[in-house]
Amino acid sequence: MAEIIQKDGTWTFDGDAVRIVPGRDKGVGLLRQTLGEVVVPLRALAGISYEPGRKAGRLRLRMREGADALTQVTGGRLPEASDPYRLSVEPDRTGVAEYFVDAVRNALLLEQVDPGPSESYLLPGPTVPIAVGAGDGTVTFDGDRVALEWNWTTEEAKRSGGPREFRVTDLRTVEWAPAKGLENGWLRFSLTGAVQPAAPKYDPYTVELFGFKKDPLMALVAAAVALRLPHPAAPPQERVEDAPPKELPASAAGAAEDHDALLRRLRELGDLHQTGVLTADEFAAAKQSVLRRF
């Protein structure tokens, strides 16, 4: 067994998995503290490295693509203090860190672990239920339903629509992006069939992030949701619109197409009204115009 204990945390390797326990040092980010202990199975790893430094070195685990939902949704954009797969190593512990790296690498070679993409998630991810308040809203996820509530910083057009709630089965994707420079970040939920504004500040299914301490916690929500969506390597599910069309008389086919188009237009108008793009009067007039065409 190999083990390295630092203020940043403790890593232990027993031949089958790397057990990561976050430290209590003030430099340990909220994400790592909230996530708690993580057990990374050997087969989830693509590699490990140690990078020596003047003040401190770094141990880094490299996950296989698609093996870990948190790594998948953050795409290497987590701040170092929030990354559970990095460990700050004091200079006098360099030898221990190198021994740890050798132990893991030898096991990867012995077990012939494929460093390529994984076809399924191999880590359980954040526990649910989970609730995080950051940026212009609070997200709650119980493993099935996502609820969004807004605060005083929320753009009026978004807040006026009230809280939002939807099921994982309604989702197409979930995305997390950190604030960078003068550009705000976001936690975006894309719903199947919904027309959503591109700007996070107006999107009723997006929490806008302002670059504060709690922002990385939204990545935990994203990971918990992503675990319950189809894996990126899974074959695309057959959609209703992709199924072979049934043969209909020309007049019936045209009527069905017009009817569906009108229903889609009504949904789009409703979304635009809820997000504040259309006023109540504009929405009522546009709605009546569409209804007259049924």
Image (cartoon, rainbow, N blue to C red):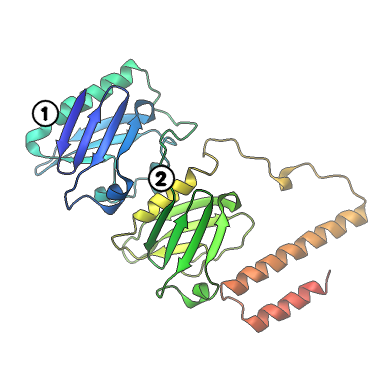
The residue where tag 1 is placed is 95
Judge left or right: residue 94 versus residue 107: left
Q: Badge 2 is on which residue?
A: 127
User: As displayed, is residue 186 above or below residue 270?
Assistant: above
Residue at left offset 13%, top offset 29%: 96
Q: Residue 244's x, y, as percent?
A: 78, 41
Q: Position of residue 80 (x, y in %)?
A: 25, 48
Q: Residues within 10 Å of mark 1 (few under 14, many from 20)?
A: few
Counting residues from the start of the chain, the first of labels 1 and 2 encountered is: 1
Q: Position of residue 282 (x, y in %)?
A: 67, 81
Residue drawn at (55%, 61%), measured in percent from left and top?
Answer: 165
Counting from the top left corner in percent of width and height, residue 70 is at 39, 44
Q: Residue at x 32, y 63 (%)?
A: 211
31 sits left or right of 144 in the view: left
**Residue situated furthest left in the rendering:** 92
Residue 212 falls in which quadrant of the image?
A: bottom left
Q: CA distance from mark 1 to mark 2?
A: 35 Å
Relative height, residue 231 to residue 162 (above, below): above
Work out whether residue 5 or residue 287 is closer to the camera in this orientation and state it: 5
Is residue 62 visible to the viewer in this orientation of the structure?
A: yes
Q: Residue at x 46, y 35 (%)?
A: 121
**SS under mark 2:** loop
Image: 165 above or below 292: above
Q: Amino acid at mark 2?
A: Thr
Q: Could you say which is closer to the camera, residue 84 or residue 108?
A: 84
Query: Mark 1 is on which residue type?
Result: Gly
